Amino acid sequence: MKKIVASNFKATHTRKSTKEFIDDVNGYLKESEISNDVFIFPAATALDSFEVNENLTIGAQNAYPTKSGSFTGEIGTIHLDEFGIKTILIGHSERRHILGESQKEIVIKYNYFKAMGYKIIYCFGEPLEVKNCGMTETLGYIWEQFDGIDLNYDNLILAYEPVWAIGTGISATSEDIAIIHKKIKKKINKPLLYGGSVKVCTLQDILEVPNVDGVLVGTASWDVDDFKKMIYIASKMDKDSKKLTCNTEE
Ligand code: PEP
């Protein structure tokens, strides 16, 4: 399976810079003939009807489980339909821990977008205090984040994102990732991404970890040249796994 590369813009990039970013990435995919699946999740205000290659998908970071209605500050599926958006992130740790989304609310959202046939990238991962309690607690915490989630859903991609690694500059080690991904893959046969402070220089090592099908990247993906380097590294890994340098100018 070709490695997946996804960029989460969070609350960065304007409407203008999002368009420039997407055009740049799209042009790069075209000219390089890279066929790996690439996802970009812009801010809601920057969503639009982008004309992109088949393997480049623009998704929503979030939406309310409704078509439309009285939900101040939220967007519903009419807003996504306007731009043909059919992909969504659900369960991101910033929504769980900063914005207070409960597992119950996440399940409602998941079921709603599943019923609408969306591709769902479902994020889960443990906070530091749980990691520090050991592997049994960590896995127990992770399984609870699957409570109520239909893991047989066809259009599902999973993303293991330890909370302590997101936006902190501290990535999980390859050993940590290998253990968790193996345990998850044993139970759930879905594409499984790793996310948490992935950088251009660490990407290849992470993609080489068994059972890592790709990456979900925040901070280090916001520079379009770095994101293109990540796509390049991921595409080369499908062909050969010789060590690439960080300056992947080819
Ligand atoms: C994310 O937002 O999903 C993420 C992994 O962020 P970062 O790469 O900044 O840790």
Image: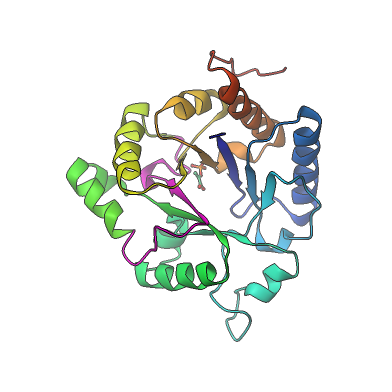
Give the left or right position of residue 237, taking residue 192 as reference. Answer: right
Q: Position of residue 154 (x, y in %)?
A: 49, 57
Segment colored magenta: 146-169
Give the left or right position of residue 184, taking residue 238 as reference. Answer: left
Q: From this viewpoint, is residue 199 visible?
A: yes
Q: From this viewpoint, is residue 133 visible?
A: no
In the rendered image, which quarter is residue 14 located in? bottom right
Q: Which residue does the image show at 33% across and 58% down from the upper left? A: 145
Q: Is 58 situated above or below 184?
A: below
Q: Which residue does the image show at 54% across and 31% down from the upper left? A: 199
Whether residue 247 appears in magenta in the rendering, the answer is no
Is 45 in front, or is 158?
158
Q: How is the image coloured?
A: rainbow
Whether residue 150 appears in magenta in the rendering, the answer is yes
Where the C terminus falls, by quadrant?
A: top right
Give the left or right position of residue 21, taking residue 135 as reference. Answer: right
Q: Which residue does the image show at 60% across and 74% down from the upper left? A: 74
Q: Is 180 situated above or below 64?
A: above
Q: Position of residue 28 (x, y in %)?
A: 77, 33
Q: Is 183 situated above or below 234?
A: below
| Main SS, magenta residues | loop
Q: Which residue does the image show at 79% across and 54% down from the upper left? A: 50
Q: Position of residue 234 (x, y in %)?
A: 59, 29
Q: How many marks?
A: 0
Q: Position of residue 229 (x, y in %)?
A: 66, 27
Q: Is 178 situated above or below 90?
A: above
